[in-house]
Amino acid sequence: MSNLERDPVELLCPPDVARRPMIAVLQPRDVPLGGPRAMQVRRTLPQRGRTTIGAWCFADHYGPDDVAATGGMVVPPHPHTGLQTVSWLFEGEIEHRDSTGSVELVRPGAVNLMTAGRGISHSEVSTPATRRLHGVQLWVALPDASRGTLPFFEHAETEEVVVDDARVRVFAGSLPGLGGEASVTLFSPLVGAQIELPAGGEAWIDLDPAFEHGVLVDRGPVRVTVPPLDGEDDDRPDDADPLAETGHAETLAWSELGYLPTGHEGVRLTATDAPVRVILLGGVPFVEELVMWWNFIGRTHDEVAAFRREWQADVIGRDNPDGRFGTVDGYDGSALPAPELPTVRLKPRS
């Protein structure tokens, strides 16, 4: 999905590897994407104070939307650099087209992963059969050693695995001891999973302690409990049940994201009187600096400005349709022009 904001925020993202003993609750902000019938999304990454979770650097949560009222998703061809897009649906169907020639449908239970690498363009349009649209759009920052790779696209079905009362689908990477992960290419250690609980259900989900994690709530509320980190007060015996009421706990509401620092070997998820569905994101803390603006990820202002110039000249101006971003065949309409850059250089935000 494109970032269709008319005035996208510029971000230079410094390394953020500080451990936080508590579960931090990140609030979403409403972002309208597009024109008069803008599609509304709730964005929890990036935001002030938290730009990445592992290499996950962008999280939009949308729907459930009545397509007859909203017009659904119509995202014209637009560019990306230095990232992977991960499309995951709860309801509906979206047609993906990109400049590598890929044409694929996004449906619930399957993941579409597009690696932009040095540059790609793509479009996303909800299909005529879609009545309700509901899902998440995620971006993964590519490490410097991999961001020049040639673009490619992958589609993979996922397998449902039962853990305690939960039904889990892993769509990126893996969870410790679980299996069932989707076969898509990643360039840094990551996990992305959908976890569902019935009303009153609970589950202990094993985590990689080298990862930081985020729990994004699609249905809730959900109570999130983690044992104390090493060095914190913990009166439990060594053989204590990890589901015991101890450690830190937060109740997360719809569209909130709970951040867990590194060091945790598991998390307890508990539903109250309503079913729960969450997206679990995790990864090794990303220690490279990033400049994120519009649909580009780079390392400097000058690099991002150069990406924009190429897009405007080669695609919008049609000077070089075979350039860095290529063309999207089969889309009935024009590509999306880039917004104007800020009048000051892209720089770190306090």
Image (cartoon, rainbow, N blue to C red):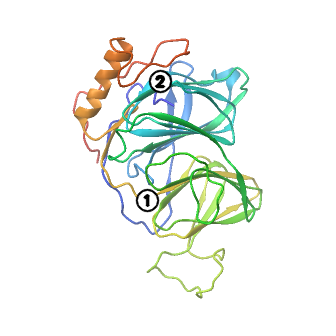
Q: Amino acid at mark 2?
A: Ser
- Whole-percent x and y of residue 215? 56, 55
Determine whether 3 is above or below 193 in the image.
above
- Residue 57 visible in the snapshot: yes
| Front-most of residues 23 and 323 | 323
Determine whether 239 is above or below 46 in the image.
below
Mark 1 Cα shell of 10 Å, populated few (<14), some (14-19), many (≥20):
many
- Which residue is painted at 46% across and 79% down in the image? 232
To which quarter of the image does residue 69 belong?
top right
Mark 2 Cα shell of 10 Å, populated few (<14), some (14-19), many (≥20):
many
> Left of 196 or right of it: where is 348?
left
Mark 2 or 1 closer to N-term? 2
Q: CA distance from mark 2 to mark 1?
A: 31 Å
Instruction: Residue 99: give its label.
Output: 2
Instruction: Residue 110: give its label.
Output: none
Q: Return the residue at label 1.
A: 284
Instruction: Single out the residue that lies furthest toward the bottom.
Output: 237
For mark 2, give the secondary structure.
Answer: loop
For mark 1, give the secondary structure.
Answer: loop
| Front-most of residues 325 and 3 | 325
- Whole-percent x and y of residue 345? 22, 33
Callout 2–callout 1 Cβ contact below 8 Å: no
To which quarter of the image does residue 313 belong?
top left
- Which residue is painted at 62% across and 66% down in the image? 177
To which quarter of the image does residue 315 belong?
top left
Determine whether 309 is above or below 216 in the image.
above
Q: How many numbered marks have been drawn onto this rendered protein structure?
A: 2
- Which residue is painted at 29% across and 32% down in the image? 304
Determine whether 98 is above or below 256 in the image.
above
- Whole-percent x and y of residue 140? 45, 44
- Which residue is painted at 61% across and 49% down in the image? 182
Q: Nearer the viewer, mark 2 or mark 1?
A: 2
